[in-house]
Image (tube, rainbow, N blue to C red):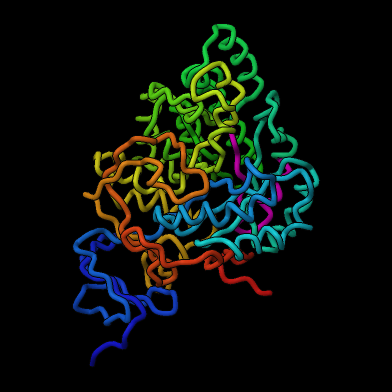
Amino acid sequence: MQAEEADLTVYNARVVTPGRTLMGGVAATDGRIIKVCADDELPPGNDEIDAGGNYLIPGLIDPHVHIGRRSGGYPNQLEVEFETETRGALHGGVTTVINFIEQSEPYLPDLDFFIEVGERNSYVDFTHHFVMSHDHHVEEIEELASAGFRSYKMFFNMYKHMDIDIVPSEADRVYRVLKKVAEMNHGLAMFHAENSDLSYVRRQEVQAEHRHDMQAWADASPPISEAMQIEHAGMLTEYTNSRSYVVHISSAAGVESLARYRAKGVDIHGETLVAFLALTYDDDLGTWGKVSPPIRSEDDKQALWKAIRTGVIEHVGTDHISTDREVNEMGQGRHGPHFWESPPGLQPGVEYFLPVMLSEGVNRGRISIERLVDVSSTNNAKRFGLYPRKGAIVEGADADMVLVDLNASAVIDDAFYHTRETSWSPFHGWTVTGLPTHTIVGGNIAVENGERHRHPGDGSFLPVYNDGVSRPRTR
């Protein structure tokens, strides 16, 4: 008896599933995967895609994006950028984003806005982290958790001596957040780990040498600055028997500190960035490559790839931000003494995430495509409570998938991007090999060979509840 028709069937694919890659396909109905099997066992589909032997992987989950922070006024700029930035994510094969919400005022009065602005404008599914920059934010954690938000970020000692609209946290607030996380199910404390006190002195020394390039920026925040704060985060996580996550690890020294606490059984995970895996300060991109922590040396880059291969680092994200080129360059071009005053941030990461990981990781033999799926999708879903709804091609999961052609190439130029600001990028001029050809969201073809079939507001909010399950919120 012939199987009932599915909404969508993808066949003739190399399907990357947990534990194995199989030759066959996937069928989806009502937004969920109903069959993962050999081609001859697949039901016919109302829509069908012949994968042509290419890889079918779960949609990427970017755990580190900043939507609406720099230009046009926050939080109102969220209204604009949830549309523009998730549009780019969709074209890049990213089907879920986790955005950082950050303001001095209490979060709870604006909670509905932070949810609904995404529901009105996002092309992809989304949720939020909340930055614990004030003590009154810590008091909101229980209600944030009840609303489905279970990850809380702190800038641990960072930005104390910089003219920037971010308030650092010290050990007292870090301890209180970790203690609250330890008392709840499926919560997570997150850390930006850089020691600002050391970096302040080093910056004065470097600037006195009249240096203003990417290596100078890296020297002003040396690897020990990152490692010191990871040590503190690891000690406090162990002391509170809590759960933590260090964002954007950039150095071999940071990897060594993380590895030591993981080997002790401390529940601390680490993330690195696509840019840290592909660039070094020798690329000398000027303000286009300025980010905190800095892009570092070739040795640091190779240490990060090794950490991914060996499982010390389990997560990759982008630190995506949308900044006007004029703001980034301060109207003075990429290079010059104004480098020190230029706002840090990587533009526009969600769209280069998958192509650069395919080109620099899989096609250069640094990692397998299965490991790419682990660190760019599955592990991100698990750490932030979205698995198995997201992050894997398994029956019952949301049918978020990406078809990739490892032989397809493109130049990353202005025409490559679909985000708000497309006139600059740290990868500008690069040729990448390995591209998404189809993005599938909720069992529907969202992008097919560059043509978009999805609309703003089609994305859904992803709360995570006390039982650790992500499901549609009740209204």
Q: Residue at x 51, y 27 (%)?
A: 287
Q: Where does residue 304 sit, x and y in percent of width and height? A: 39, 34
Furthest toward the top, the residue is 209
Furthest toward the bottom, the residue is 1
Q: Where does residue 390 sit, x and y in percent of width and height? A: 46, 63
Give the left or right position of residue 252, taking residue 177 as reference.
left
Residue 181 part of the magenta segment:
yes
Of residue 301 and residue 46, the one placed in the foreground of this image is 46
Q: Quadrant of residue 273?
A: top left
Q: Report how many numbered discs are placed on residues in the image.
A: 0
When the figure is inspected, residue 4 is found, relative to residue 155, above or below; the finding is below
Give the left or right position of residue 253, taking residue 408 as reference.
right
What range of the chain is rendered magenta?
175-193
Residue 178 appearing in the image = no
Give the left or right position of residue 43, taking residue 346 as reference.
left
Of residue 452 and residue 163, the one placed in the foreground of this image is 452
Q: Where does residue 254 sit, x and y in percent of width and height? A: 49, 30
Q: Where does residue 57 sit, x and y in percent of width and height? A: 33, 59
Residue 13 appearing in the image = yes
Q: Residue at x 36, y 53 (%)?
A: 373
Furthest toward the front, the residue is 331
Q: Quadrant of the N terminus?
A: bottom left
Residue 182 part of the magenta segment:
yes
When the figure is inspected, residue 141 is found, relative to residue 153, above or below; the finding is below
Q: Quadrant of the C terminus?
A: bottom right
